[in-house]
Amino acid sequence: MNNPLFPPKIGLIIAVTALSFPAIFIRYAQADGLSIAFLRLFLASLILWPIAGTKVPPAWRALTPGERWRVIAAGFFLGIHMFLWVTAVTKTTIASAAFLIITQPVMLAVLAHFFLKERINRSVVYAIIFTLFGAGLMGGGDLELGSEYLWGDFLAFSGALMAAFYLLAGRSVRGKIHILPYITLIYSVAALALLPLCIIAESPLLSLSSNAYFWIFMLTLIPTLIGHSLYNWALRYMKAFTVNISIAVEPIGATFLAWLLFKEQPSSFLYLGAVMLIIAVAFAFRTEKA
């Protein structure tokens, strides 16, 4: 395994910061979720192919058939995750969508234990417990807001499951392929996975407002090309669970921005839940040797 250019934990901090913004950009875009999800991934692919295009064919040929299928699976799950997550943000509060997405580290811990043989030790158990309690405290506000938000909550939870599968598949192959060809491939596959849905739904991909295209570009640049790419980069050097649970601190920034920009009042348990999520991440980092 090659030594990283900078500490993976620093990369995760940058990724978490970048991924505090997607819900805000989605709200500003004011477009349908399917169009936003597809264009976000399509633009990311469009930017990456001129940069990494010559590296993709040899990287692809170096993979075994099984590893190629795992790359395709990672891209497919990423595409479905993006669609469900973007749609969830338009159906429920930003805080609730962000908090429900952090159930994915728990799902991934179980999946990684069985498929990647990443051991669930005492620190991982403590991290899972603090994550569940923290998410429960911070996301419980929807019980007071009404049943109309439950559909959005369900979509966010389903998106979390897809994200867990996406990172699981990526972790299993990231040691075999460089980050640039890898993200080029998975973003391209994710966009292709959503294209048939766009055609069936007659999504207005070419007739959105200039405001929508601007915020979708920002969504592509910051949360996708910086945030998601750094998560995938870190998978080469850290356990899937550790990388994934760092997502737990994203809702803190997202909720603050939602309160500041959209006046969405967070749950009164925000601060206690935030502390518990930070403790969960600290326990997860204890499982890493580096």
Image (cartoon, rainbow, N blue to C red):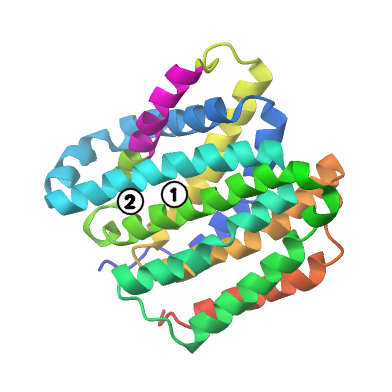
Q: Residue at x 67, y 57 (%)?
A: 99
Q: Which residues are magenta?
A: 187-201
In magenta segment, residue 189: yes
Residue drawn at 22 percent across, 41 percent down: 55
Considering the image in quadrants, where does the N terminus appear? bottom left
Residue 8 in view of the camera: no
What amino acid type is highlighted by mark number 2?
Answer: Ile
Look at the numbered discs 2 and 1 and tell me whether their residues touch, using CB distance below 8 Å.
yes
Residue 72 at x, y = what percent? Answer: 28, 43
The residue wearing badge 2 is 179
Q: Is residue 175 above or below residue 151?
A: below
Q: Furthest residue to the front?
A: 147
- The main secondary structure of the magenta stretch is helix
The residue positioned 32% from the left and 30% from the top of the image is 50
What residue is disc 1 on? Answer: 229
CA separation in Å, label 2 and label 1: 8 Å
Q: Does residue 58 show up?
A: yes
Question: In this rendering, would 74 be left or right of 262?
Answer: left
Tell me what residue is drawn at x 80 percent, y 65 percent: 270
Q: Earlier in the sequence, mark 2 or mark 1?
A: 2
Q: Position of residue 112 (x, y in %)?
A: 37, 69
